[in-house]
Image (cartoon, rainbow, N blue to C red):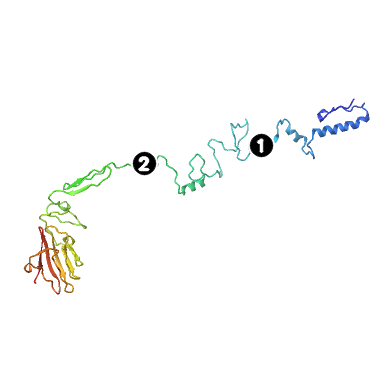
C-alpha cells in the first residue's frame, strides 16, 4: 500500500505499513510519524508529566480553563449575583442557616464606626465605643422632649408649657396684671386703711420671727402698742458738708473734722433726728444751708460744748425744720 499523507496524528492510518510494503518505505513512515507528532504538539518543549487520567480531566472543555476559573467565586468572601441555587442533595450540615442562625463559640463581625445607625451587626467593640463616645445618636422628632421611665419601660415625654400664671392674696392686698399669659410682672400692693393683725389673731398681737416686715411707703399705723421697748437706728455722720436725712437713722452721731456746713437731705413732714455732736478740736457748724428755725437759745444756733457731746433735736413740721438744744447750756 502506498504511504499515506497527513499533518496531525489523527491523519495517520493505523494499518500502515502493511506486510507487503517495501522495506525501502520504512524511513518515510518514520518521518511521517515525527512530523505529525510535532504538528499535533507544537508548544511542547519539555516533558509532559500528567498521566492519562489527569489529561482526561479536560475532556469536554470547550473554552480556556483559566477564563472559566476567573469567572468563579473565590472561597474567601465570595460575592454572588443573581439567584444562588444549592444543588439538590448537597449537604450543608454543620453550617448556620440564614434564618435565625444559632451561633456557638466566639463569632466575629466587622466593627462599625461610632454613630452608625443601620441594620449592620453591632459588635461588643462598637457598643463600648458608642457608649463612651462624646457624639450622641440623633433623635429625629424628639427635639425639646425628655426621657422618662415608669420603672419598667422608658419613653419620650413632652415638656408641657405653662399657659398662664396667677396669684391669690389676702383681701387687704391688691393684685394687678394677673394672670400672666406670656411675660410680665405681677404687682401686689397694700389696700385699705386698717393694718392686718399678725399671726392670724385679733386685737393687739405679738409679732415673732426675724427679718424686716415692710408694710408700705408712708404707712399710717393707729393705736400701736410696743411692748418691751424698741431699738432705733444709729447712724454716724461724716464729712464737713453732710446731707442730714432722717432716713439714715433717728439717732445720728457726728464728730466734726473741721468747720462744717450741713445741708438738708431727704425730709418728710413729721420726721425727726436726735443729733449728738462732738466738736472735735473746737470746730464750729454753720446751719444756714439747713435753714433751721431754732426754738432755744433765743432763736439762735446753740454753741457747741468744748467737751462732751452737744445734743440737738431737729424735727420737721410742714415745710419748716425746727431745732432745739437738749439739756443745760
Q: Which mark is residue 70?
A: 1
Q: Which mark, residue 220?
A: none
- Residue 106's spot in the image, x, y percent? 56, 45
Which residue occupies 84% across, 33% down? 35
Describe residue 303's horizontal placement relative to residue 186 as left or right: left
Q: Position of residue 181 (x, y in %)?
A: 26, 42
Q: Residue 272: x percent and y percent?
A: 13, 61
Residue 231 appears in the figure = no
Dot 2: few (<14), some (14–19), or many (≥20) neighbours within 10 Å? few
Q: Residues within 10 Å of mark 1 (few under 14, many from 20)?
A: few
- Report helix, strand or loop for mark 2: strand
Q: In the displayed structure, would residue 307 be above or below residue 236? A: below
Residue 157: numbered disc: 2
**How far apart are the alpha carbons under marks 1 and 2?**
59 Å
Q: Which label lies toward us, 1 or 2?
A: 1
Which residue ends up furthest to the top in the rendered image? 1
Quarter of the image with the C terminus is bottom left
Disc 1 element: helix
Amino acid at each position: 500500500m502506498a504511504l499515506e499523507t497527513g499533518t496531525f496524528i489523527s491523519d495517520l492510518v493505523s494499518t500502515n505499513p502493511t506486510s507487503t510494503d517495501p522495506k525501502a518505505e520504512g524511513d518515510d513512515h518514520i518521518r511521517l510519524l515525527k512530523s505529525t507528532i510535532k504538528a499535533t504538539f507544537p508548544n511542547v518543549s519539555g516533558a509532559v508529566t500528567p498521566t492519562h487520567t489527569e489529561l482526561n480531566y479536560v475532556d469536554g472543555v470547550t473554552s480556556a480553563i483559566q477564563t472559566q476559573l476567573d469567572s468563579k467565586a473565590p472561597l474567601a468572601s465570595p460575592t454572588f449575583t443573581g439567584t444562588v441555587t444549592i444543588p439538590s442533595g448537597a449537604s450543608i450540615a454543620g453550617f448556620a442557616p440564614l434564618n435565625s442562625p444559632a451561633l456557638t463559640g466566639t463569632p466575629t463581625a466587622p466593627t462599625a464606626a461610632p454613630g452608625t445607625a443601620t441594620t449592620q451587626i453591632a459588635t461588643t467593640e462598637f457598643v463600648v465605643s458608642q457608649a463612651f463616645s462624646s457624639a450622641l445618636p440623633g433623635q429625629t422628632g424628639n427635639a425639646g422632649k425628655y426621657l422618662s421611665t415608669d420603672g419598667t419601660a422608658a419613653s419620650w415625654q413632652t415638656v408641657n408649657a405653662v399657659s398662664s400664671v396667677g396669684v391669690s392674696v389676702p383681701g387687704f392686698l391688691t393684685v394687678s396684671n394677673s394672670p400672666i399669659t406670656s411675660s410680665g410682672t405681677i404687682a401686689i400692693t397694700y389696700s385699705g386703711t386698717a393694718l392686718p393683725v399678725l399671726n392670724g389673731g385679733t386685737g393687739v398681737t405679738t409679732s415673732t420671727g426675724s427679718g424686716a416686715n415692710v408694710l408700705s411707703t408712708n404707712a399710717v399705723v393707729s393705736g400701736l402698742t410696743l411692748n418691751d421697748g424698741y431699738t432705733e437706728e444709729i447712724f454716724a455722720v461724716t464729712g464737713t458738708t453732710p446731707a442730714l436725712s432722717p432716713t439714715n437713722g433717728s439717732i445720728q452721731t457726728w464728730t466734726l473734722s473741721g468747720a462744717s456746713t450741713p445741708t438738708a437731705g431727704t425730709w418728710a413732714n413729721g420726721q425727726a433726728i436726735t443729733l449728738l455732736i462732738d466738736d472735735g478740736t473746737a470746730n464750729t457748724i454753720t446751719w444756714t444751708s439747713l435753714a433751721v428755725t431754732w426754738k432755744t437759745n433765743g432763736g439762735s444756733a446753740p454753741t457747741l460744748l468744748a467737751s462732751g457731746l452737744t445734743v440737738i433735736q431737729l424735727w420737721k413740721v410742714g415745710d419748716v425744720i425746727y431745732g432745739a438744744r437738749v439739756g443745760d447750756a
